[in-house]
Image: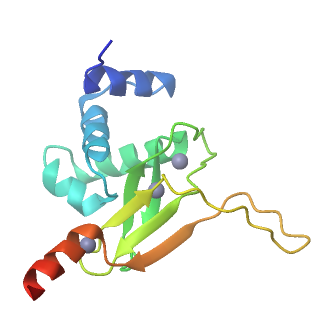
Amino acid sequence: MIQTSDTKFEALLEKHHLKKTGPRLKVLSMLAAKNVATSQPDLESVLDDIDRVTLYRILNAFEEKGIIHKVFDLNGTANYAMCSSNCEENHHHDEHLHFNCTICNNVYCLDELNLPALNLPNGFKPTGFTLYATGVCPKCNKLAAKKAS
Ligand SMILES: [Zn+2]
Ligand SMILES: [Zn+2]
Ligand SMILES: [Zn+2]
């Protein structure tokens, strides 16, 4: 059965005991539609019918519930991306590589990489880790190649 994205997002809110409100559904569908993390100002400019405080509260609630995670870009701006399905309330498992493009500043979640296990020195008990890479994304590489030819 094909689920329309709305039903899918409604189910997601229900699962996390959040009321299904229009603004919440809009924020979810926006974040899910993009393959890069999105900053609050970017969300604001598209979702201009949602006021700043409401948006802030929605993002905070989603992050707390394990629906989205926050990642900071090179400028120190917080960006938000959908979580993998195994995140739980107050317990995130977004242990994937975040790639920050130095040209377009987009932050990509690269879930498809298998990360090696980290052997930390004795006495260190990690509860999570963040891997971060900077460089040039495929889109900007392509643009650069076009310019050069
Ligand atoms: Zn998460
Ligand atoms: Zn780029
Ligand atoms: Zn991510």
**Nearer to us in this view, 112 or 99:** 112
Q: Total of numbered circles in the picture?
A: 0
Q: Quadrant of the N terminus?
A: top left
**Is residue 61 placed above or below 139 in the rendered structure?**
above
- Residue plotted at (13% across, 49% down): 48
Snapshot quadrant of residue 44: bottom left
**Is residue 119 placed above or below 28 in the rendered structure?**
below
Snapshot quadrant of residue 2: top left
State the image coordinates of residue 83 (x, y, percent, origin top left): 47, 45
**Is residue 69 placed above or below 123 in the rendered structure?**
above
Snapshot quadrant of residue 141: bottom left
State the image coordinates of residue 95 (x, y, percent, origin top left): 59, 56
State the image coordinates of residue 43 (x, y, percent, origin top left): 23, 54
**Nearer to us in this view, 3 or 61:** 3
**Nearer to us in this view, 42 or 3:** 3
Residue placed farthest to the right in the image? Answer: 122
- Residue plotted at (45% across, 42% down): 62
Q: Quadrant of the C terminus?
A: bottom left
Residue placed farthest to the top in the image? Answer: 1
State the image coordinates of residue 135 (x, y, percent, origin top left): 37, 80
Does residue 110 appear to the left or right of 89 in the view shown? left
- Residue plotted at (67% across, 59% down): 128
Does residue 13 appear to the left or right of 55 in the view shown? right
**Nearer to us in this view, 50 or 104:** 104
Does residue 98 appear to the left or right of 125 in the view shown? left
- Residue plotted at (30% across, 27% down): 21
**Is residue 83 placed above or below 13 in the rendered structure?**
below
